[in-house]
Amino acid sequence: MIPLRDANPTRRTPVVTIGLIVASVVVFAWELGLLTSGGLDALDAFIYQWGLVPAQLTADIEASSLVTLDTLDLVTSQFIHGGFLHLLSNLLFLWIFGNNVEDRLGRLGFLAFFLAGGIVAGLTQVATDPESAVPMVGASGAIAATLGAYVILFPRARITSLVFLGFFYQLIDVPAVIVLVFWFALQLIDGLASLGADVDIAFFAHIGGFLFGVAVALVVRTVSGRRGVTAMGRSDPAGVG
């Protein structure tokens, strides 16, 4: 099941979502430039410098060195991608779901939420394999946080999805709660299956990011609900006991 678009209009232009997409594309173009000019060695050096290497971050934490380039990698790694498919799939999900979450949280709120979600996702993955020397890159952890927030804030939004049935496919409209809970279930299953194995996908970053997004959205929904009740009480004197 591949989501293609949602029927959930926004009230204003998603400036931050567009900015995050542009930033990721610009960084990927820089990666391609390094690959062209310096070959794989130059690209690998860039990824190791700005990607998140669990072993390096673990060493810094153990040494109580919390403000280093390695901790900065928790942010910079979110804008690096390992290939066209990696980039395009992440940006598709960000465009479909990010604009509505930005609309709900506000522009600065969404930017802070997105970066924090990526940090939590990265730390979750590091916790599962703290001695790994393989750099982690990509915005998928932050995007997973966005998906977690979306499923709480817009559970009934209709998502047009491409569903494969053997050699055939069909476009169907599915509630967001079904699409995103199904996605999370796959991450959870694959994550548990990957424990102790050498895999290229950071499933636990997806899991940690998603749960962070759910938690933040529950708080936002609760606070918004209380404000709505308070506003109604103030505007209607008959409701005051």
Image (spheres, rainbow, N blue to C red):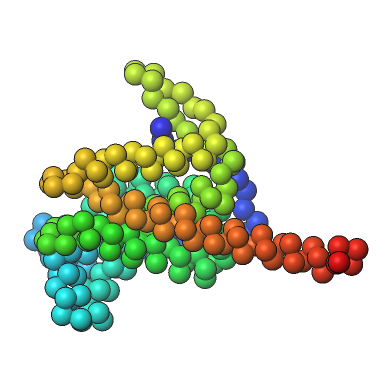
Left or right: where 34 falls relative to 7: left
| Residue 117 picture location, percent across and down | 39, 62
Residue 116: quadrant of the picture: bottom left
Count numbered badges in the picture.
Answer: 0
Q: Is residue 113 above or below residue 172?
A: below
- Is residue 172 visible to us here? yes
Residue at image coords 55%, 36%: 175
Q: Quadrant of the C terminus?
A: bottom right
Tell me if residue 24 can be seen.
no
Say which residue appears at 65% left-offset and 56% top-offset: 11
Residue 95: % across, % down: 47, 50
User: Which quadrant of the structure image shows residue 240?
Assistant: bottom right
144, 12: nearer the viewer: 144
Residue 164 shown left or right of residue 57 in the figure? right
Q: Residue at x 53, y 50 (%)?
A: 152
Residue lying furthest left in this view? 41
Q: Which residue sits furthest top? A: 167
Q: Residue furthest right?
A: 238
Quadrant location of the N terminus in the rendered image: top left
Name the residue at 12% across, 62% down: 131
Whether 25 is drawn above or below 186: the answer is: below
Residue 100: % across, % down: 56, 53
